[in-house]
Image: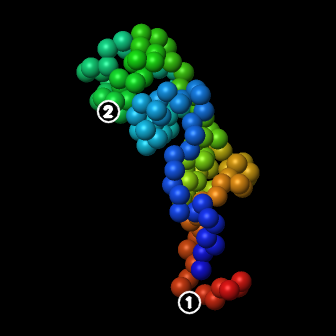
Amino acid sequence: MAFNHPKTERRDPVEAPSSISWLVDAVGEDAALEFIEANAGKRLYIPQNPNDCLLAELYGPEVARAVCRYRGGEQYQVPLVKAWRVHVLANRGLNSNEIASRTGLTWGRVSYLTQNVPVERRRARAVHPGQADLFG
């Protein structure tokens, strides 16, 4: 039987840092995470016109409009926001190994960042259904 923390059932969005809150507010957590994970740390040239640009083709028109509105006609270095990404992924149920792989952090650092995240997370390895519960 899994431990049920009062906040386990919640899958509320994680509060975004100010460096990306404009993007999360404009397109939502899912689209912002997809864009950031694909481009974190990169310096991108952002066109002024979001129509028919590579951003729209790769990430959709909403992301293209938001990024062009924020940084159109400029170079934009996409922030790493590793702690935010760790909390978003933990909130979605990924285990520390999966999060470490996606963020480029060590398992230990992910564990440290998620030690107070009140969500139910999958185990790194499946438990055999016939195995007795040690604590139950």
User: Looking at this rendering, what residue extends furthest in the top direction?
Assistant: 73
User: Looking at this rendering, what residue extends furthest in the front direction?
Assistant: 6
- Rounded to the nearest angstrom, the CA distance separating label 2 from label 1 is 46 Å
Quarter holding residue 116: bottom right
**Residue 16 on image: x %, y %:** 57, 36
Which residue: 56% across, 44% down?
Answer: 14
Q: How is the image coloured?
A: rainbow
**Residue 126 on image: x %, y %:** 56, 74
Residue type at numbered disc 1: Gly
User: Looking at this rendering, what residue extends furthest in the left direction?
Assistant: 52
* Vertical arrangement, residue 46 with respect to residue 78, above or below: above
Quarter holding residue 123: bottom right
Q: Is residue 16 found left or right of 74 in the rendered image?
A: right
Which residue: 62% across, 64% down?
Answer: 6
Q: Quadrant of the C terminus?
A: bottom right
Q: Which is in the foreground here, disc 2 or disc 1?
A: 2
- The local crowd at label 2, few if under 14, some if 14 to 19, many if 20 or more residues have their Cα within 10 Å, is some
Which residue: 53% across, 30% down?
Answer: 21
Label 1 sits on residue: 130
Q: Nearer the viewer, residue 34 or 17?
A: 17
Q: Nearer the viewer, residue 33 or 42?
A: 33
Looking at marks 2 and 1 on the same chain, the residue that comes earlier in the sequence is marked by 2
Which residue: 51% across, 18% down?
Answer: 76
**Residue 92 on image: x %, y %:** 51, 55
Q: Is residue 111 found left or right of 34 in the rendered image?
A: right
Residue type at numbered disc 2: Gly
**Residue 61 on image: x %, y %:** 30, 29
Q: Quadrant of the N terminus?
A: bottom right
Q: Secondary structure at mark 2?
A: loop
* Vertical arrangement, residue 113 with respect to residue 65, above or below: below
Q: Secondary structure at mark 1?
A: loop
Label 2 sits on residue: 60
